[in-house]
Image (cartoon, grey):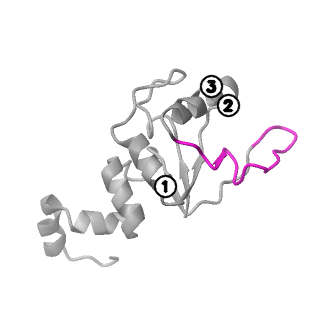
Amino acid sequence: MIIAVDFDGTIVEHNYPNIGEEIPFAISTLRMLADQRHRLILWTVRRGELLDEAVEWCRERGVEFYAVNKNFPEEILDDTGCFGKINADVFIDDCSLGGIPDWGTIYKMITEGLQWSDIYKNNPATSERVKKKKRWFW
């Protein structure tokens, strides 16, 4: 599986342009996913020296990305230096609809093929409400 991962607010707390504190279990989860042969792509707004710092920060903690802001390492950027759209199976980003779950939930969703609705329905705090609610669309 190809997994595109944001940096600020996803792997580390927001402190741009500085690097924030690691979000609990982000690095260990990414290492486990890489060990399971998932292709990790760092997909971030960071560029230049700030990007290099983020890549090195992850590398020092044992996370090597298959590609950075590209679909594959050999991809050539256009003349303006713009990046194209990333082709990934999963995007892990704090700006996604519904926010970002904790990294344990992310790992479970990826390895077990779960969706948000599966997590929501199996959460004891919400499962009663979901069972009682009549829905038209799901």
Quarter of the picture holding the N terminus: bottom right
Nearer mark to the viewer, of 1 and 2? 1
Please tell me whether residue 46 is drawn above or below residue 67 in the rendered image. above
**Residue 37 location, quadrant:** bottom right
Cα distance in 3D space between marks 3 and 2: 6 Å
**Residue 20 location, quadrant:** top left
Please report the bounds of the magenta region as a residue range.
63-82
Residue of label 2: 47
Secondary structure under tag 1 reads: helix
Residue of label 1: 35
Q: How far across and down, in percent of the image, does residue 129 sit?
A: 14, 66
Residue 19 falls left or right of residue 120: right
Identity of the residue furthest to the right in this view: 79
Nearer to us in this view, 35 or 14: 35
Residue of label 3: 50
Q: Is residue 40 magenta?
A: no
Are dots 3 and 2 in contact, CB under 8 Å?
yes
Secondary structure under tag 2 reads: loop
Q: Please report the residue visible at 46 percent of the width from the left and 55 percent of the height from the top.
A: 33
Nearer mark to the viewer, of 3 and 1? 1
- Report the amino acid beneath label 2: Arg
Q: How far across and down, in percent of the image, does residue 100 sit?
A: 38, 48
The label on residue 12 is: none
Q: How far across and down, in percent of the image, does residue 55 sit?
A: 59, 34
Residue 20 visible from this viewpoint: yes
Dot placed on the residue nearer the N-terminal end, 3 or 1? 1
Q: Please report the residue visible at 43 percent of the width from the left and 41 percent of the height from the top.
A: 27
